[in-house]
Every structure is written in structure tokens, then in C-alpha cells.
Amino acid sequence: MSAGSGSEDRVNSLNKTPVAELRKQVNELTQTSQNLLTEKLFLENEINQLKKRISRLDDEIRIMREPPFIVGYIQDLTENHAIVRSSNGTVFQVSVNSNIDRDLLKPGTRISMNQDTLTVIDILNDGWDPLVASREIIEKPDTLYEEIGGMQEQINQLKQSIELPLNKPETFRKMGLTPPKGVLLTGPPGTGKTMMARALANSTSATFIGLVGSELAQKYIGEGGRLVRELFDLAKQKSPTIIFIDEIDAIGSKRLDSSTSGDREVQRTLMQLLAEMDGFEATSNIKIIAATNRPELLDKALLRPGRLDRIIEIGLPDKEGRLDILQIISKGIPTDKEVNLQQVSKQTKGFSGAELKALIMEAGLNAISNNRNSISRKDINLALEIINENRLDLGKSNPEALYG
């Protein structure tokens, strides 16, 4: 068969193919072409995204390969140069990047410098130690004065010492009175010292900075003093400010002749605290609240007038105070009619507020364990036994002294 005859056969075959079949094939080829075009566009877009990612990664690698900058402070300025102090304490005369606004450079400004040329590269914001900065309470605590029972007199004293000078400073100036700089809250554990500080933070619009005294006791020489300086610098910047130092005996104990470096560092921290407390006026917008359950351990210099001027003693609640606390704690908690809180207050002589809260908690746990929806008198009695046993286990082996 010749080649010409083969071509004629194909043409004849196409001529015999129905028109509908040809249209179907054309549509399929068109659809395939569109799918391939869509896939091409998708792949081109993915390639562009990968190229951008490669560029970002190249920039990150370049940045990581750059030498680190040195942090320092401006000490003085000349016409063309700056006198800076680096982080290790060395002083240099260096150039300033032409892109930096010289009006922003002032003595004390925190800056970054090139490691090789020490040229001033950028101006940094004031940095606070994370331990200090994180102690600023942004959201107000939900504790209210009304939730503290049996301490109305102490609450009034705290308001007079802290809130009144912040709210009415002009009144003190007109009367020629010097308001207290600080207040010391003393009393046994669990009596509500920290709770009163939280309630104060809730009731005032001042910035509240709270920390534990042991956090200021640092291992390395000078670190504790630096934290105290930053604490008061932050308080001045955020004023009006209330500084609350819980367990202040950790750094405020009496100074003794000690041979250990740790004790000497704690004493340095205390001396820095005393110096900072002397550094602001009593009429300023900074107030200090300290708390401890061992006031006899505190250094006398800390308690002299002009520092912690007023001492508010928060003792164990009396019978009326215990009843007040029990009513506040049990508010909203279902109890049987046979539960007489006044009788419970008589049985809990010597209990602190924290122990009364633990009493109601134990009674509630026992009720839930027995599938009951309210606290019965039996639950209270069982909780009393548990709390009393715990108190005796803590070393209080004389029941008469315990409840006296």
C-alpha cells in the first residue's frame, strides 16, 4: 500500500467521525490546556514566594554574621563627637552616626555602638531589668476592702497613710504636715497583710509595683543594689506609684559583722534601699508598703521616721473579727441551717484569716466527697479536726498557748 493511500484513509476516517465526537475532543483539550495554564501560574507564584523566603533567610544570615553592638550611655557631647561610657565602664570619645538626630542625644541617653569603631549607631529606650519591669501590676487585682474582715481599723490606717497623701497632697502642704513615706505591715502569717496590699492596688489609680524581698537578694556583687535603683527609677517614671515589698526581712535584717560575701551583698542592697528611700520627698508621688511577720529582725535604720514612718500591726482576729471573716468567706456557699457561724467563731480562737478560709474549704471538700450540695455541721467539725491537727504538726504542740 502506498503512502498516499494511507493519508486518504485517515482523511476518510475523520470525515466519518461524528461532529459531536470532535467537539468533545476539542473541549477536553481546551480544559486540559486551561488546567496546565492554572498549574503554571500556581507554580510561578510558589517560585516567587520561595525566592522571597530565600531573600529573607539571606538577610537573617547576614544579620547573624554581623558583630554585636555594645550598649553604652552618653556622658557628654562635643561639637562633632560624643563622650560615651560602655557597658564595661570604659569611657570613649566616639563619632555619631549622621542619621541620628543630635537633639535626642543627652547625657544619660542609652545608646548602641559599633563593636569595632564604637560609633554611636542607634538610640535605645530605657531598659528595665525583667525582674523589675514584670512586677508592675497592669491589671488591677479583684480584691476589695469589703472582702477583708475584722481589720477595719488597720484598713483606715492604711488609707490615711497611703491613699490620702496621694489623693490630697495640697491639703498636707497647706497644713504644714509631712505625710508618711512608707508603711510597715506586721503580723503573724495568714492574717491578711498581702491581701490588704492587693485591695489597696484595686482601690487606687496609682501604679502598683509588687515584689518579694528575697528577689532583691542577688548572688553577684552590685546586682541587688542595681535592682533597687531600677525599681525606684521605674516608680518615678510611672508615678504616682505604690511599691509593695513583701517579706522585707529578707533584705532588711539587722546589719551584723559577717564574713560571708552573701551577707555583705544583702547589706549593700539594704543600704541602697535606705539611700533610695531618702532620695525622694515625703510629699512625692511614691509610697512604700513593706510587710513582714518578723519585725524584730528589721534594721532600726529602716524603721526610723522618714522611711517606714508608720507601723500597722495586723494581729489574729478576735471573736467578732473571726465571725466577720467567716461570713465573708461563706457568702455564696450553701450551708445547712444547723451551721451557726457565731458558734464556729468561738471554736476557732487563735485562727488566722487564712486558716478560717482553709476551714471552710475543708468542710466544702468533705461535703462534695459525700455527694451533698451544702455544708453541714458535721463537715465543719471534721474540718476543725483537720485544721487543728495541721497546726499542731507545724510545731504548735501547746493547745492552750495556740488558742490563747
Image (cartoon, rainbow, N blue to C red):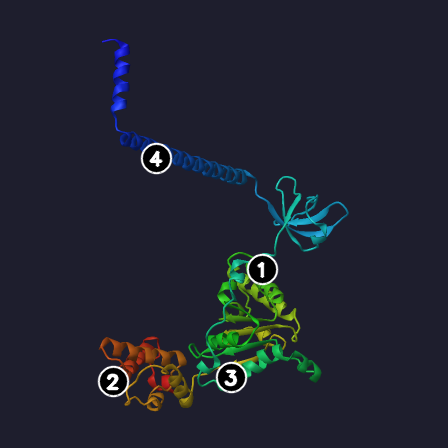
Q: Earlier in the sequence, mark 2 or mark 4?
A: 4
Per the image, the residue denoted by label 1 is 226
Q: Residues within 10 Å of mark 1 (few under 14, many from 20)?
A: some
Where is residue 261? Give x, y as percent. 52, 59
Q: Is residue 151 visible?
A: yes
Residue 177 lies in quadrant: bottom right
The reply, left or right, for residue 397 in relation to residue 137 is: left
- Numbered disc in front, either 2 or 4: 4
For the residue labelled by badge 3, is the local secondary structure a helix, a strand or a loop? helix
Q: Which mark is residue 378?
A: 2
Q: What's the CA distance linking mark 1 and mark 4? A: 73 Å
Return the residue nearer the eye: 359 or 372.
372
Q: Earlier in the sequence, mark 3 or mark 1?
A: 3
For the residue labelled by badge 1, is the local secondary structure a helix, a strand or a loop? helix
Q: What's the CA distance linking mark 2 and mark 4? A: 82 Å
Per the image, the residue denoted by label 3 is 154
The reply, left or right, for residue 366 in relation to residue 215 is: left
* Residue type, numbered disc 4: Gln
Q: In the figure, 326 relative to 226: above or below?
A: below
Which residue is painted at 26% across and 76% down in the image? 368
* Residue type, numbered disc 1: Arg
* Residue type, numbered disc 3: Gln
Identify the image quadrant of the N terminus.
Answer: top left
- Numbered disc in front, either 3 or 4: 4
Per the image, the residue denoted by label 4 is 31
Where is residue 103? Give x, y as percent. 72, 53
Where is residue 317? Give x, y as percent. 43, 85
Which residue is painted at 48% across and 81% down in the image? 145
* Residue type, numbered disc 2: Lys
Which residue is painted at 37% across and 32% down in the image? 33
For the residue labelled by badge 2, is the local secondary structure a helix, a strand or a loop? helix
